[in-house]
Image (cartoon, helix red, strand yellow):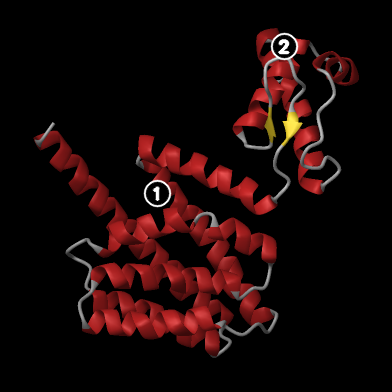
């Protein structure tokens, strides 16, 4: 048995407990965590594990500590907490391009579920989607890639917002910058025409409005998969360019 590995994970239970207490409001902004020795005794871990846990909580933006003082809660807002996670994901993306491809998988899972719920639960597409599809058409007519990318992102965000789940909306809003990054990369691939991209979105829009959940999900899945393929082309081309110009 790897006792070193076991010890390295002892701080996790401490992190989970305090994170839950902060986000639930049990611990409010301005409250201080117990002394390290008290926490260690309560969780039957070493003070070293407690310090590791507090460091994790601090990295997540949930607590702040000063030398000689107990850690203080500085955030209890779920949106801001998810925002800090989004920043972490963006940092990972800047280090490894495959995180961008993984984001496409996340989009697929969330958006397909959202479409199913919109139809099955009788939700209407909100005004964000209506505006996005109209503005997307104008962007195509003007051959405006930048504007089209913004409308594309707004379209997908609007679909998720239409579900009416506030937590889901907050979570997806915090991925907006990353999603927009994906769309900007894929919309600039020369092989992808804007009118074809618009047609994909128009089909999704029409199928949702006609309450055809299965067809809408299939169309959306196809659109995201197409974007993933264009994304791979863009990343491959960028990699080749970097190799030629080190």
Is residue 36 positioned above or below 88 on the image?
Answer: above
Q: Nearer the N terminus, badge 2 or badge 1? A: 2
Quarter of the figure with residue 123: bottom right
Tell me which residue sits at (54%, 88%) in the image: 209
Q: What whole-number distance in Å separates the C-alpha atoms at marks 2 and 1?
A: 37 Å
Nearer the viewer's eye, disc 2 or disc 1? 2
Q: Which mark is residue 198?
A: none
Quadrant in which the N terminus is drawn: top right
Q: What residue is shown at x 25% (from left), y 80% (from top)? A: 140
Where is residue 243 shown, x and y percent of the image? 14, 34
Which residue is depicted at the point 38% across and 73% down?
151
Q: Position of residue 114 (x, y in %)?
A: 60, 70
Indicate left or right for 140 with 58 as reference: left
Q: Can you identify the residue that label 1 sits on?
A: 101
Q: Is residue 1 among what the camera can see? A: no
Q: Residue farthest to the left? A: 244
In front of the other: 105 or 56: 56
SS class, disc 1? helix
Q: Label 2: how many residues lie within 10 Å, few (<14), some (14-19) or many (20+)?
A: some
Quadrant of res 97: top left
Q: What residue is drawn where x is 70% and y is 50%?
A: 77
Location of mark 2 (residue): 48
Say if mark 2 contacts mark 1, CB within 8 Å: no
Is residue 221 shown left or right of residue 68? left
């Amino acid at each position: 048995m790897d006792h070193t590995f076991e010890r390295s994970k002892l701080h996790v239970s401490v992190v989970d407990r305090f994170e839950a207490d902060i986000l639930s409001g049990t611990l409010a902004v301005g409250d201080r965590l117990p002394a390290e020795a008290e926490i260690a005794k309560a969780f039957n871990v070493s003070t070293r594990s407690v310090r590791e846990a507090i460091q994790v909580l601090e990295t997540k933006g949930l607590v702040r500590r000063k030398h000689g003082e107990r850690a203080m809660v500085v955030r209890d807002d779920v949106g801001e907490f998810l925002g800090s996670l989004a920043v972490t994901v963006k940092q990972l993306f800047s280090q490894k391009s495959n995180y961008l491809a993984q984001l496409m998988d996340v989009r697929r899972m969330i958006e397909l579920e959202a479409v199913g719920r919109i139809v099955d639960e009788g939700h209407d597409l909100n005004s964000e989607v209506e505006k996005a599809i109209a503005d997307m058409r104008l962007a195509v007519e003007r051959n405006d890639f930048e504007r089209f990318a913004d409308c594309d992102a707004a379209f997908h965000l609007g679909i998720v917002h239409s579900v009416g789940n506030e937590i889901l909306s907050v979570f997806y809003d915090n991925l907006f910058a990353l999603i927009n990054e994906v769309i900007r990369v894929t919309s600039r691939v020369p092989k992808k025409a804007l009118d074809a991209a618009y047609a994909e979105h128009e089909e999704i829009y029409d199928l949702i409005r006609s309450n055809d959940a299965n067809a809408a999900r299939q169309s959306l899945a196809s659109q995201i998969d197409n974007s993933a393929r264009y994304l791979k082309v863009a990343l491959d081309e960028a990699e080749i360019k970097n190799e030629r110009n080190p």
